[in-house]
Image: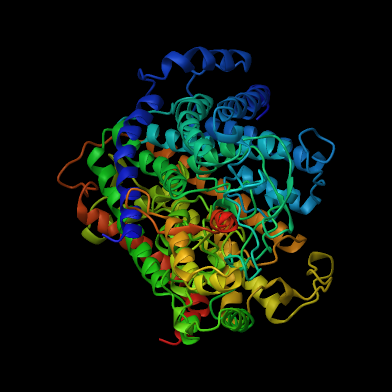
Amino acid sequence: MKKELIPSLILTVICIVFFSGVYPLLMWGIAQMAPNHGEGFVVKDSKGKYYYENIGQKFTDDKYFWSRPSGVDYNAAGSGGSNKAPDNPDYLADVQKRIDTFMTHNPGIKKAEIPSDMVTASGSGLDPHISVEAANIQVARIAKQRGFDNNKVAALVKAHIEAPMYGMGPERINVLKLNIDLDNIK
Amino acid sequence: MNPQILGVVVMFIATLLLAVPLGRYVAKVYGGQKVWTDLIFNPIERLFFKASRIDPGIEMGWKQSLKALLTINLIWFLWIMFCLLNQSWLPMNPDHNPNMTPDLALNTAISFLVNCNLQDYSGETGVSYFSQVFGLMFLQFVSAATGMAAAAVVFNALRDRTTEKLGNFYNYFLKSCTRILLPVCILVAVIHLFEGTPMTFKGIDTLTTVQGDTMHVSRGPVAAFVAIKHVGTNGGGFYGANSAHPLENPTYLSNIVQMIAQILIPFAMVFAFGFYCNKKRLAWIFWGVMTAGFLILVVPAVIAEVQGNPYIAQMGISQPGGNMEGKEIRFGAIASAFWSIATTVISTGSVNAMHDSFMPLSGMNMLLGMMINSFYGGVGVGFLNFFIYVILAVFIGGLMVGRTPEFGGKKIEAREMKIAMIIALFHPFLILVGTAIASYLAAHDTNMGWWFADAAGKHNASGWLNNPSYHGFSEMLYQYTSSSANNGSGFEGLGDNNPFWNISTSIVLLFSRFLPIIGPIAIAGLLAQKKFIPASSGTLKTDTAIFGILVFAVKVIIAALAFFPALALGPIAEWMKMPH
């Protein structure tokens, strides 16, 4: 072991410099060419305020499309899911409560129309997306709250559907971008 | 085809198409043949070796290779402990994260040293950028290269000849880092930069949301980290939510890239063995056995997740996306289910959905992936684990048909068999003893004193469970299985940041990493010294489908006998209780 000590020690120091110094600096350099210089993609509203487009926000106000429930209350200084088991009675009671709340705020919706993503927490607690179904069942509420025609809101939702990438993966809607554009409707 | 199914099929095929040429390249690197990266790395490596006073041309025996491996690992352990225990005053800590407690530092240090990345902390609050980059990310490179170098030593020993010289460990180690891991990492990281993953040294950003709330957003040098996290099958995330986090894994494309990045080298190592030892047919048989095992586990998991949660179905709402608790919309249930099995059969342990909230049969298949731990397996070490089963299969097969057990022209004798048996049985031993102790304590609600306190400050052992009943048992079983498989994923509801879990899993981690490296190298080293006997009519042929089935059967029998009772108490019981 003694014979290996010096070579191991020097090789370690060199590897730290190379893989923890040179490699990340190179990536940081390339990041300067990426959108927003590697500080996370942002999207701006009409007043020029910026938001992180990939980080979901809490939307609980009736005049905005709601985002999914969150295990961390959309505080992106942390992240995580509920880690509840499918058969956990406390968890199932929570889901039932969310269904009831949703029904109260969206009168006229049939229970069978609610997609489960609207009442279950995401893995990160920061999911920026909801399913197309989840957006569609909120259209009537938004239209009523804002005094818009139903069709106008439905068209906005349709315009925000992000298609599968080259035919792969699920359809989805970015709630933040949808709500920013909702605020822009005159 | 359903767009979500198409996504995972494309992922798998793309990985295979990339892995075969990469395997050929890896074989050339370990064989010292000319490759295109010579131009860049020859001068760099020469400089590194000269400064370290290493002559990469001097070949080592298997014992000396192990000595070098263990010595350098010990140095890394001391370095990472220093980082984690002093990060509060070290540079690059814009969010002012505190030092780790000694037990958490021990667990984190060992867990990254052994390529497991268990992570009883959350990246946002638990570590500084210095610890992330100079400590954890450094270990993600070198721990992966350690496993690959160990596999290279075994490859060298399995060539058809008699020798005591098995190459130079440092040479295999450094070349694994520079010529294999680094180029792939650069490619993966650059794609991530343009998909929205941050690469900045700035700290938390504070802003007001559209609705008017205040929110904080953690950033950091994520892109470089997430690349080696997958390419080295480490799995430790930059953020707490790992690859479910929308900055760590922002799009469906980044998800595909991460998935390919983590299976790529485990695939390629099998093919590298074929090219290096000139046993290409045998390599394909091995790959076929691994793939059969993977598919048997992944298909039921995908079906279970697409069908959704029957308890939620009973509430009368619809589940068009399947079981969405703990999953992200941008990946969907199918890509998440595929990932959950891929990350557990190889030893990555990164997650893009929360495993605790998967359906019971999916959870069982994740556990089985880690219990068998060699359907692909981690970079390098997956091949070593597989090798143990091959030795067992050769011996059993030889006895069954009355032939001398031989592998690659070398007799398998009592000494090799003893080592193989110890390694094969130690894995279930660590998992089951650990789980038995923890579940005994939880069932008796023992007062744990200093060893454990929950968020409310109570010391009752049942407080570490996030879910009651059978699933609670599964949480504990998963934690030790993940530790012993050096996987690092978790049923994260388990309250594991306390001395009891930090220390007990650290012990499991150390044994389960180094024994499965020492064992196969010792067997291979012993075999390499033996006289080479050319194949004759009395030889049990190993490059046949029959032998492949035999290896598969040996794995299934060992796993079933060892783990069925534990699985019956956890996921199987949970599944049987469900409404069907």
Q: Total marks drawn?
A: 0
**Residue B330 pos. (x, y %):** 47, 56
Relative vertical location of residue B212 with respect to residue B321 in this rendering, above or below:
above
Q: Nearer the viewer, residue B13 or A64?
A: A64
**Residue A45 pos. (x, y %):** 62, 48
Relative vertical location of residue B261 with respect to residue A85 in this rendering, above or below:
above
Colouring used for the render: rainbow
Q: Quadrant of residue B244?
A: bottom right
Q: Nearer the viewer, residue B505 or B535?
A: B505
Report if residue B254 is visible in the image. Answer: yes
Q: Residue at x 42, y 60 (%)?
A: A158
**Residue B214 pos. (x, y %):** 75, 55
**Residue B24 pos. (x, y %):** 32, 31
Report if residue B405 is visible in the image. Answer: no
Q: Residue at x 21, y 59 (%)?
A: B401
Q: Nearer the viewer, residue B427 or A183?
A: A183
Q: Which quarter of the image is occupied by the N terminus of chain A?
A: top right
Relative vertical location of residue B333 with respect to residue B391 in this rendering, above or below:
below
Q: Is residue A124 left or right of residue B298?
A: right
Q: Is residue A118 left or right of residue B119?
A: left
Q: Quadrant of residue B531?
A: top left
Q: Which quarter of the image is occupied by the C terminus of chain A?
A: bottom right
